[in-house]
Amino acid sequence: MPKCDHCGAHVSERFARVFADEHGEIHACVSCSANAGIAEAAKERVRGT
């Protein structure tokens, strides 16, 4: 089962598919970050920053 690389909380396979970066790392999850923070991290990843 995938987990958040920041806090270690387990996340669903679906969450990992949507929010993991190209290396499969999950930098924030709903346990350790506000939903807005997760979305912002995903946008930054797409921009390549």
Image: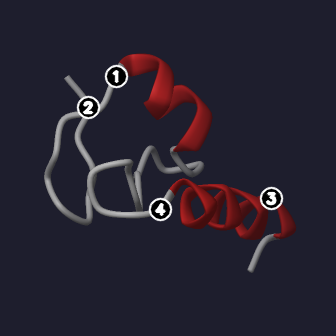
Secondary-structure class at tag 4? loop
Quarter of the view holding residue 12 = top left
The correct choice, above or below, for 4 with respect to 14 in the image is below
Residue at 48% across / 19% down in the picture? 14
Residue labelled with disc 2: 2
Nearest-to-viewer mark from 3 and 4: 4
Query: Which sits earlier in the primary sequence, circle 2 or circle 3?
Result: 2
Q: Which label is found at residue 34?
A: 4
Q: Amino acid at mark 2?
A: Pro
Name the residue nearer the viewer: 22 or 41: 41
Crowding near pointer 4: few (<14 within 10 Å), some, many (20+)?
few
CA separation, marks 2 and 4?
19 Å
Residue at 27% across / 51% down in the picture? 31
Q: Amino acid at mark 1?
A: Ser
User: Do the numbered discs 2 and 4 sit on residues whose CB atoms are within 8 Å?
Assistant: no
Q: Position of residue 15 (x, y in %)?
A: 47, 29
Nearest-to-viewer mark from 3 and 1: 1
Residue at 80% across / 58% down in the picture? 46
